[in-house]
């Protein structure tokens, strides 16, 4: 049997399609997961997770969380309703 002895140096790259798929699945299941939580869960450093999120998955950092850019129909409806309520309130304030 051939065995390789431990040696100093940089470890092999863990940024591969398998890890990218795991990160993608995790943020789809739980959108408020932090980089630290994923790094600890997958056993890699935070810098690697950030690179995957930004470079491979096209995410950007918003309010210390990586968020999806697409809203569901219910979320979109809530945002529109909220905006209409604000506009109505502003109109009432200006009339008074």
Image (cartoon, grey):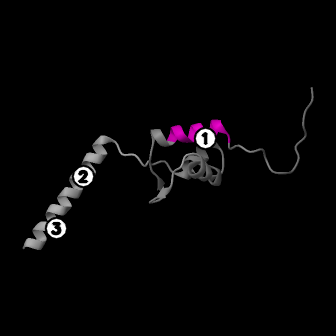
In the displayed structure, does residue 51 sit left or right of residue 66? right
Q: Name the residue under label 3.
A: 90
Q: Is residue 26 above or below residue 93?
A: above
Q: Residue at x 58, y 37 (%)?
A: 21
Q: In this view, does 42 lie above or below 83?
A: above
Q: Mark 1 points at which residue?
A: 20
Q: In this view, does 18 lie above or below 46?
A: above
**Image: magenta residue range:** 16-26
Q: Sort mark 2 into few (<14), some (14-19) or many (20+) by Cα contacts within 10 Å.
A: few
Number of the label disc, if any, that sits on residue 80: 2
Q: How many marks?
A: 3
Earlier in the chain: of badge 3 and badge 2, it is 2
Q: For the residues carrying marks 2 and 1, which lies nearer the camera in this image?
A: 2
Q: Residue furthest right?
A: 2
In the displayed structure, does residue 45 sit left or right of residue 33? right
Earlier in the chain: of badge 2 and badge 1, it is 1
Determine the secondary structure under disc 1. helix
Where is residue 64 drawn, in percent x and y? Answer: 48, 59
Q: Sort mark 3 into few (<14), some (14-19) or many (20+) by Cα contacts within 10 Å.
A: few
Q: Does the magenta run of residues contain 25?
A: yes
Q: Does the magenta run of residues contain 51?
A: no
Q: Nearer the viewer, residue 47 or 86?
A: 86
Estimate the spatial distance between the alpha carbons at disc 2 and disc 1, rounded to whole Å: 34 Å
Q: Sort mark 1 into few (<14), some (14-19) or many (20+) by Cα contacts within 10 Å.
A: some
Where is residue 23 drawn, in percent x and y? Answer: 56, 42
Q: For the residues carrying marks 3 and 1, which lies nearer the camera in this image?
A: 3
Which quadrant holds the N terminus? top right
Where is residue 11 drawn, in percent x and y? Answer: 79, 47
Estimate the spatial distance between the alpha carbons at disc 3 and disc 2, rounded to whole Å: 15 Å
């Amino acid at each position: 049997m051939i065995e390789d002895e431990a040696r100093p140096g940089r470890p092999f790259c863990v940024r591969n399609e398998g890890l990218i798929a795991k990160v993608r699945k995790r943020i789809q299941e739980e959108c408020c997961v932090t980089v630290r939580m994923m790094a600890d869960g997958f056993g890699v450093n935070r810098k690697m997770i950030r690179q995957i999120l930004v470079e491979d998955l096209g995410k950007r950092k918003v309010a210390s969380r990586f968020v999806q850019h697409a809203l569901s129909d219910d979320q979109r409806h809530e945002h529109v309703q909220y905006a209409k309520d604000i506009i109505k309130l502003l109109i009432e304030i200006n009339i008074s």
